[in-house]
């Protein structure tokens, strides 16, 4: 049960914001912030008012049911209304609880996605390429902007590793459950006996950190420059344009050589390093908070097998929520992606609500 005072404070805050925004006496930056807060509250304010009025409404209906002078038609109506009222109250309560859950400050951030081929040799690199194409299609559908940061190709069009930045609305909240081991089961083109092979690729989704999110001291960095090398050891550039940045306190290291400019490589490298350090700090804080928390998803453990793509059966299965979609091709085209993400988000919300109760 939500304390009545908490719900009343939400309603009062909504009224105050409405008054402030209609006054016209507010600067642009504050107006934008308050408009967003007002918009968020606007979605649940009617539910909050119904939640407050529930006790009075229920009491009135119970009076009718207890009144021996009430006719049968009125009693029947009151009984139906009471049942409907209770169902609606439970829905309102859940909606308000979800709204009151602690927000992840990173949810609205852009994201950096890293995909690496795992076990399975060439087939694993081809699967890593398939996953990257899927995220490209999802980004295109959602009108997100995807910018390649670095890419390492294998033979036959596969990818050993690819890192990209994705910008748009609520990117991290949508993609954060993609972190983990993705497994593929299919017959490779090179397989003559028709046997199904199992390969894997690892996906890491990091919130893109701004300088205000994380301060990195220059004295904590070691920056090495070297000549970029291409496939087979051939020189990509005749100058020392490649950059390796090492964060001395943590030992985290990032190498970047895709650009011909040392300055551009350093900027890209710092973007990746900042995101990794930010995620490292978030993970440390989250572990301290969640020692007693029971969750199946959202752990961000990159060694956890989260999903299987089975081509012979045309299915994709998420092992965290035991959801199977027999629409593998659609999923890889980005068409059924939202259905999976919505199910994962709902499960994460349910777990958060259960942890509040315990």
Image (cartoon, rainbow, N blue to C red):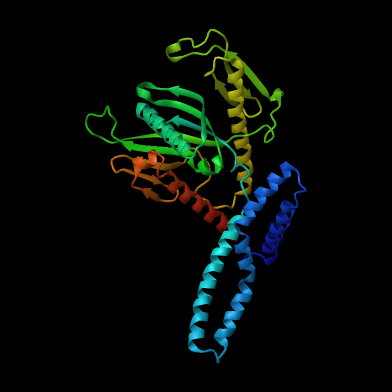
Query: x and y percent of residue 120 in the render?
Result: 36, 30
Is 293 in front, or is 214?
214
Residue 5 in sight in this render? yes
Q: Is residue 63 above or below residue 304?
A: below
Q: Position of residue 169 (x, y in %)?
A: 56, 41
Is residue 255 placed above or below 84 in the rendered structure? above
Please identify the residue farthest to the top as the structure is shown: 238
Q: In screen coordinates, is 6 left or right of 271?
A: right
Within the image, what quadrant is residue 329 found in? Answer: top left
Name the quarter where the N terminus is drawn: bottom right
Looking at the rendered image, the quarter that the C terminus falls into is bottom right
Query: Can residue 358 be spotted in the picture?
Result: no
Quarter location, residue 130: top left
| Residue 137 falls left or right of residue 195 | right
Q: Residue furthest right?
A: 25
From the viewer's side, name the closer residue of 245 and 290: 245
């Amino acid at each position: 049960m939500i304390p009545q005072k908490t719900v009343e404070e939400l309603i009062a805050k909504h009224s105050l914001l409405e008054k402030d925004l209609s006054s016209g006496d507010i600067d642009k930056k504050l107006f934008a912030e308050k408009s967003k807060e007002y918009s968020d509250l606007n979605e649940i304010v009617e539910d909050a008012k119904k939640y407050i009025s529930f006790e009075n409404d229920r009491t009135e209906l119970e009076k009718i049911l207890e009144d021996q002078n009430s006719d049968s038609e009125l009693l029947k109506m009151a009984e139906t209304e009471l049942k409907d009222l209770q169902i609606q109250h439970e829905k309102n309560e859940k909606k308000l609880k979800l709204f009151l859950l602690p927000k992840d400050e990173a949810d609205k951030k852009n994201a950096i996605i890293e995909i690496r081929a795992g076990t399975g040799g060439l087939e694993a690199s081809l699967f890593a390429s398939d996953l990257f194409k899927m995220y490209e299609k999802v980004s295109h559908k959602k009108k997100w902007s995807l910018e390649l940061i670095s890419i390492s190709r294998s033979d036959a069009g596969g990818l050993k590793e690819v890192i990209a930045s994705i910008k748009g609305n609520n990117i991290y909240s949508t993609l954060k459950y993609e972190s983990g081991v993705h497994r593929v089961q299919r017959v490779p083109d090179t397989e003559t006996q028709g046997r199904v092979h199992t390969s894997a690729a690892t996906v890491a989704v990091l919130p893109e950190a701004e300088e205000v999110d994380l301060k990195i001291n220059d004295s904590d960095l070691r920056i090495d420059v070297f000549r970029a090398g291409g496939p087979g050891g051939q020189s990509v550039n005749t100058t020392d344009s490649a950059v390796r940045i090492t964060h001395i306190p943590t030992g985290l290291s990032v190498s970047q050589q895709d650009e011909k400019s040392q300055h551009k490589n350093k900027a890209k490298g710092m973007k990746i390093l900042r995101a990794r350090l930010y995620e490292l700090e978030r993970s440390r804080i989250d572990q301290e908070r969640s020692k007693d928390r029971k969750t199946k998803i959202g752990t961000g453990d990159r060694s956890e097998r989260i999903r299987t793509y089975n081509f012979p059966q045309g299915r994709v299965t998420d092992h965290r929520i035991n959801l199977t979609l027999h629409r593998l091709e659609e999923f890889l085209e980005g068409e059924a992606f939202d259905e999976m993400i919505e199910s994962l988000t709902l499960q994460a919300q349910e777990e958060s609500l259960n942890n509040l109760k315990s």
